[in-house]
Image: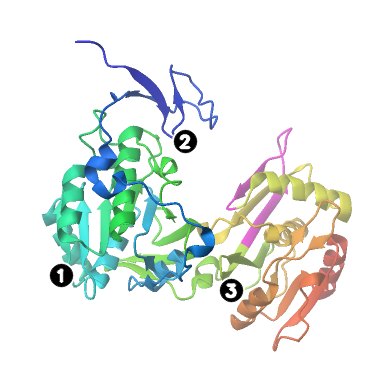
Amino acid sequence: MAKAKTNYTCSECGGVSSKWTGQCAACQQWNTMVETVIEAAGANRFSQTHQSLAQTAPVLSLQDIEALDVPRFGTGIEEFDRVLGGGLVAGGVVLIGGDPGIGKSTLLLQALANMSQVKSVLYVSGEESGAQIALRAKRLAVDAKDLKLQAEIQLEKILATLNDIKPQVAVIDSIQTLYSDALTSAPGSVAQVRECAAQLTRMAKTTGVTIILVGHVTKEGSLAGPRVLEHIVDAVLYFEGDNNSSFRLVRAIKNRFGAVNELGVFAMTEKGLKGVSNPSALFLSQHDSQVPGSVVMVTQEGTRPLLVEIQALVDASHLPNARRLSVGLEQNRLAMLLAVLHRHAGIAAFDQDVFINAVGGVKITEPAADLAVLLAINSSMRNKALPRGFVVFGEVGLAGEIRPAPRGQERLREAAKLGFSVAMIPKANAPKQPIEGMTIIPVERIDDAFSRLRELQ
């Protein structure tokens, strides 16, 4: 028998190479090239699965196509609906990625149990048996008597079940366990994951069933992660959080039917994942008194303002090169802010170790945290706490100016609602109307911010 032809596919981006290379030429990742078998050319497997796909779609003028608002239906979990942009969409494909054991299956079982009261739903499990899922549903105390379940990993059988039952919502847990008879590679390979996802997506678009795919991300990268599927699906959600913590964050990084960067906050309990109504309380440390190096800022996650505590610790360095460590914020930006602090405020930290932490494990990617970081560093260096009820936000430029942050009014209202009384903000974000119970300190430059702060301390 002739030897099967093979090539090498990147498990991160899906790039293909005819020979093995240590580094992927497309995404520059190391040790991600996996050998896969080249499939023999044959009949079109897509047309065999869905006869309607073999027909040529007509060419239409865009103005002749009626644009309709996409109707949504809720999952019964408010935080989950928030991340989805208001709910699920008929014919949409959603990918939920995250580390194993973080709570993906638990959340989806709860959502399917809620939707089964009013809709036809199907749970396809490729990892657990029916008895295991029934035991989990009993532990979560969910009403799942109308939830249909199939334990199967062969794609063709799953597609046949979807055509037969015609559910309105189907969950595939997980996409890495499925395999198609059209390919000879093992389940979890890049080829199988892409093939199965493409077939399920075509099923969703032709029948109108909403499909939710579960994708695992392993630290070793041995399985094809959701990265190779992001361009296929309509929405991509990521679970964040530590397995040792009871809190989970679900973040949307792609959504064709809603806003991206939305954030849902959940708490893991004995009865499953519960939405947190006031997530700002999770990211604020409870100090008996004000401590040096601690500043509260207002960050914006999608449409939701969150109050997060930024902590800084500055200590004399005993190494030739002082350390710069940042948890929850970008480390390169910390080095840039320290240079701005020295140049425009006259505060040098070249011989100091600087450690920055965002409390609660939240990751802040927006530059509106710049002013909070500099004030926390200055507070730690002087060993002098900031006033009680003090909140801040603003971007710092390389010229020392403090630039405005988007949705400043919403940030101030959220801080006032939680009892903060003094806010230092960029001058461009100063509200036209005063906010009841809050003193606004608008600043234009970093040296102006430090001088105004010394007046309060």
Residue placed under numbered mark 3 in the picture: 288
Is residue 409 something that shows in the picture? Answer: yes
Mark 2: amino acid:
Cys
Instruction: Please state which of residues 116 and 320 is positioned toward the viewer in this rendering.
Output: 116
Residue placed under numbered mark 1 in the picture: 146
Residue at image position (28%, 41%) is 46
Disc 2 and disc 3 in contact, CB within 8 angstroms: no
Instruction: Please state which of residues 80 and 233 is positioned toward the viewer in this rendering.
Output: 233
User: How packed is label 1: few (under 14 Cα within 10 Å), some, or many (20 or more)?
Assistant: some
The image shows residue 257 at horizontal and vertical percentages of 47, 63
Q: Earlier in the sequence, mark 2 or mark 3?
A: 2
The image shows residue 254 at horizontal and vertical percentages of 49, 55
Disc 3 and disc 1 in contact, CB within 8 angstroms: no
Of badges 3 and 1, the one in the foreground is 1
Instruction: Please state which of residues 88 and 224 is positioned toward the viewer in this rendering.
Output: 88
Q: Earlier in the sequence, mark 3 or mark 1?
A: 1
Mark 1: amino acid:
Asp
Residue at image position (55%, 29%) is 28
Mark 3: amino acid:
Asp
The image shows residue 447 at horizontal and vertical percentages of 87, 61
The residue segment tinted magenta is 310-328
Residue at image position (70%, 66%) is 393
Residue placed under numbered mark 2 in the picture: 13
Quadrant in which the C terminus appears: bottom right
Q: Earlier in the sequence, mark 1 or mark 2?
A: 2
Is residue 353 something that shows in the picture? Answer: no
Asked whether, in this view, residue 31 is left or right of residue 177, the answer is right
Asked which secondary structure carries label 2, the reply is loop
User: How packed is label 2: few (under 14 Cα within 10 Å), some, or many (20 or more)?
Assistant: many
